[in-house]
Amino acid sequence: HAERKGRADLAAVCIATKGGFRRINAQSNGWRPGDMSPFGIETCIRESHRALNAVFKIGPIPLWMLHHPPTNDRQGKRLVAAMLAARKLVREGLVREIGICNATVTQLEMVDEVVGPLACVQSSFSLWDKAAALPLRAKEGLTSRRGLLDWCRQHGAVFIPYG
């Protein structure tokens, strides 16, 4: 009944938001990596929580995703630290589930091992970009999007395509 009047039932909607990137300015369409430190991630999530609850009064954010893994982080230390900060806010009750976007299988393994299970993985997938469905080949785990669907299936994570 509420849908016919233009109001969605929020109980039937899963609100997801991302963090870790920031807009250059209000006039620009450009984005840049934000503060990926644990403090920066916590601040981002707390601000999102505050803003979403000011409008929708949803309680915990149903799903928060890191928009991009940190660049120049071959060992994954910054990525793991960022995701541990997000997991901390799950324990505090500000977020229900966490996920990650634009990660490789190697990065997913690092996060899964230290941080724990991810609810979802978002990556490019379309008629033109099917890498996520292709099997992962040896020595390309750090740079390739191959193998993402298999990883999600094996770890019970939802795959959210874009593209």
Image (cartoon, rainbow, N blue to C red):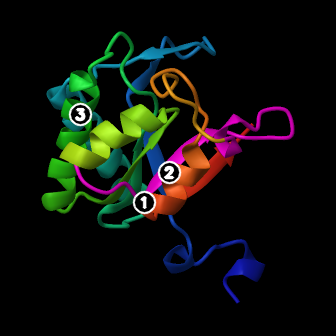
Is the residue under label 1 in contact with that under label 2 (CB below 8 Å)? yes
Indicate the amino acid at tag 2.
Trp
Q: Residue at x 23, y 23 (%)?
A: 78
Q: Position of residue 92 (x, y in %)?
A: 13, 58
- The stretch of residues the image draws in magenta is 115-134
Residue depth check, mark 1 versus mark 3: number of the one nearer the observer: 1
Residue depth check, mark 3 versus mark 2: number of the one nearer the observer: 2
Vertical position of residue 85 compared to residue 26: above or below: below
Q: Residue at x 63, y 41 (%)?
A: 135
Vertical position of residue 45 compared to residue 144: above or below: below
Q: Which residue is mark 2?
A: 151
Q: Is residue 99 visible?
A: yes
Q: Residue furthest front?
A: 138
Let me know if residue 128 is in the magenta part. yes
Tell me the SS state at disc 1.
helix
Q: Residue at x 50, y 51 (%)?
A: 151
Horizontal side, residue 79 vs residue 143: left or right = left
Tell me the SS state at disc 2.
helix
Q: Is residue 157 visible?
A: no
Q: Which residue is mark 3?
A: 80
139 or 46, which lies in front?
139
106 or 45, which lies in front?
106
Q: Circle 2: is it few (<14), some (14-19), or many (20+) Cα within 10 Å?
A: many
71 or 132, which lies in front?
132
Indicate the amino acid at tag 3.
Val
Residues at marks 3 and 2, CA–CA distance in whole angstroms:
18 Å
Q: Position of residue 35 (x, y in %)?
A: 28, 19
Indicate the amino acid at tag 1.
His
